[in-house]
């Protein structure tokens, strides 16, 4: 029985650690150059999608064509960057974020691109180089 409980505890920790790292790496890949406010806004979008889609944050980050940084796999090497500590803290506290910071947005893009999905949509916020939408 003790071995079963230990195995369960380890598998639970590993699953949490994997989600934490995936979310943090996604935040870093998408917004590490945008400072803490830009990283916070991306974390808000991840959490808003968790609420909207009713799936966990790791699945949100890994959904196909949702975060372009993950289209070829999560860049866990980003967890060695100076901004990683903040991104990991955001990943740990997704459920406590003030989603109104990004106006409850569930989509965004950089100012440098013009994705087809934004046609006819009105932005709800601009934070740094990202434009946010509530679709």
Image (spheres, helix red, strand yellow):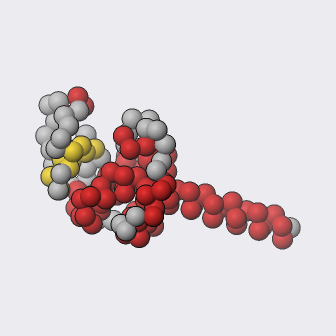
Determine whether, in the image, residue 8 is placed left or right of residue 13: right
From the top left corner, tell me how far across and down residue 42 is, in percent.
31, 55
Q: Nearer the viewer, residue 94 or 91?
A: 91
**Quarter of the image where one finds residue 65:** top left
Determine whether, in the image, residue 9 is placed left or right of residue 113: right
The answer to whether residue 96 shows anywhere in this view is no
> Which residue of the protein is positioned furthest toward the right in this rendering?
1
The answer to whether residue 72 shows anywhere in this view is yes
Q: What residue is at 77 percent from the left and 67 percent from the top?
A: 5
Q: Is residue 95 above or below residue 113?
A: below
From the top left corner, tell me how far across and down residue 17 is, in percent.
56, 62
**Quarter of the image where one finds residue 12:** bottom right
Q: What residue is at 48 percent from the left and 56 percent from the top?
A: 77
Q: What residue is at 14 percent from the left and 31 percent from the top?
A: 120
From the top left corner, tell me how far across and down residue 60 is, in percent.
44, 46
Number of marks in picture = 0
Q: Is residue 81 above or below residue 124?
A: below
Q: What residue is at 49 percent from the left and 43 percent from the top?
A: 73
Quarter of the figure with the N terminus:
bottom right
**Quarter of the image where one finds residue 13:** bottom right
Quarter of the figure with the C terminus:
top left
From the top left corner, tell me how far across and down residue 56 is, in percent.
49, 51
């Amino acid at each position: 029985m003790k071995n079963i409980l230990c195995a369960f505890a380890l598998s639970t920790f590993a699953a949490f650690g994997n989600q934490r790292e995936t979310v943090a790496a996604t935040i870093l890949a998408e917004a590490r150059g945008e400072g803490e406010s830009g990283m916070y806004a991306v974390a808000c979008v991840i959490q808003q999608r968790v609420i909207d889609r009713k799936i966990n944050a790791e699945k949100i980050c890994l959904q196909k064509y949702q975060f372009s940084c993950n289209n070829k796999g999560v860049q866990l090497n980003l967890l060695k960057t100076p901004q990683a500590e903040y991104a990991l803290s955001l990943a740990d506290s997704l459920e406590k974020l003030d989603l109104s910071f990004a106006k409850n947005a569930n989509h965004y893009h950089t100012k440098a691109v013009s994705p087809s999905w934004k046609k006819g949509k009105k932005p709800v916020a601009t934070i740094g180089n990202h434009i946010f939408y509530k679709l």
